[in-house]
Amino acid sequence: MITLYTFGPAWGLPDPSPFVTKAIVLLKMSGLPFKEDTGGFRKAPRGKLPYIRDKGQVISDSTLIRLHLEQHRQIDFDRGLTAGQRGTAWAAEKLCEDHLYWFLIQVRWLDGDNFERGPASFFKAVPGPLRPIISTIVRRQIRRSLHGQGAGRYTPEERTVLADRALASLSALLADKPYLMGPEPCGADATVFSFVAGALCPVFETPLRDKAKAYPNLVDYRTRLTRQYFPGGGA
Ligand SMILES: N[C@@H](CCC(=O)N[C@@H](CS)C(=O)NCC(=O)O)C(=O)O
């Protein structure tokens, strides 16, 4: 059986990481038996979750997990799609992972109130006196990453405009279809669902969430796919 290493449900989400949520949905879409293990972070090959163990092979990174399932388990997540639709779906997925993601990280980690509402809980295991020091170091690293990537150099207003444009694009692409590319789910739904759910997460008060709430089809999509893939609720 495949083991998927996760953080575990939090903040009303199946997992605080949209990449982990994506991997959970991909595995559910695949129909393959798998179990989740929340104890693997320290041994994560790239220092990040998700990763899987499949017949002794370890694969880290949600996209490489998808490629592994495609190549070694013969799962075509995009069956029924034309080459053009596959391209569009891939582009939508990467819009989430390589653009929208950074705006989510910014509001969750660098806004003081939101940090206290969410990521601060990751440091509970750190002994009391060390906790503020470690969390400050980690937040500083995240600030540097955001600066390096570029999202950290925008003003908050500019970030909101850009995040909104990404959400508007996803909303327009989804239109009134049940899934991103039509009547059946495809691989990109695992990703787009995870990031839309993350943007709508009720724990964080952000202009990004307000923008996301203004797209009723994205809100319905989040609710519909949560019911489908997480019938017991998000967390
Ligand atoms: N490209 C990776 C990104 C995974 C990723 O960024 N995971 C984050 C959580 S959202 C993580 O594990 N961060 C822990 C760390 O950087 O220390 C994927 O698709 O799996």
Image (cartoon, rainbow, N blue to C red):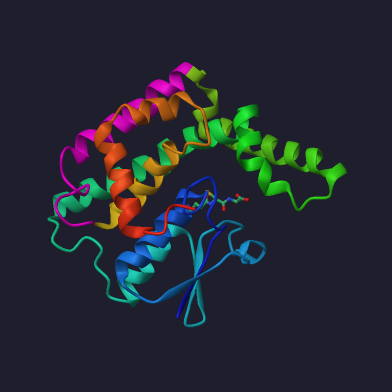
Depth check: give the residue in front, 64 or 195.
195
Q: Residue furthest front?
A: 232
Q: Is residue 153 left or right of residue 173?
A: right
Residue 27 location, quadrant: bottom left
Is 33 placed above or below 120 here?
Answer: below
Residue drawn at x 45%, y 49% is: 18
Residue drawn at x 49%, y 36% is: 104
Q: Examine the residues drawn in magenta and state their main secondary structure.
A: helix
Q: Position of residue 42 (x, y in %)?
A: 67, 63
Q: Position of residue 79 (x, y in %)?
A: 18, 64
Residue 45 location, quadrant: bottom right
Q: Position of residue 162 (x, y in %)?
A: 38, 25
Depth check: give the residue in front, 53 or 183.
183
Residue drawn at x 46%, y 54% is: 14
Q: Is residue 75 magenta?
A: no
Q: Is residue 202 left or right of residue 196?
A: right
Q: Magenta segment range?
A: 157-185
Depth check: give the residue in front, 2 or 127.
127
Q: Is residue 172 magenta?
A: yes
Residue 213 location, quadrant: top left
Is 34 placed above or below 129 here?
Answer: below
Q: Residue furthest right?
A: 129
Q: Position of residue 30 (x, y in %)?
A: 31, 69
Is 17 placed above or below 141 here?
Answer: below
Residue drawn at x 32%, y 45% is: 223
The quarter of the image holding the N terminus is: bottom left
Is 28 placed above or below 89 here?
Answer: below
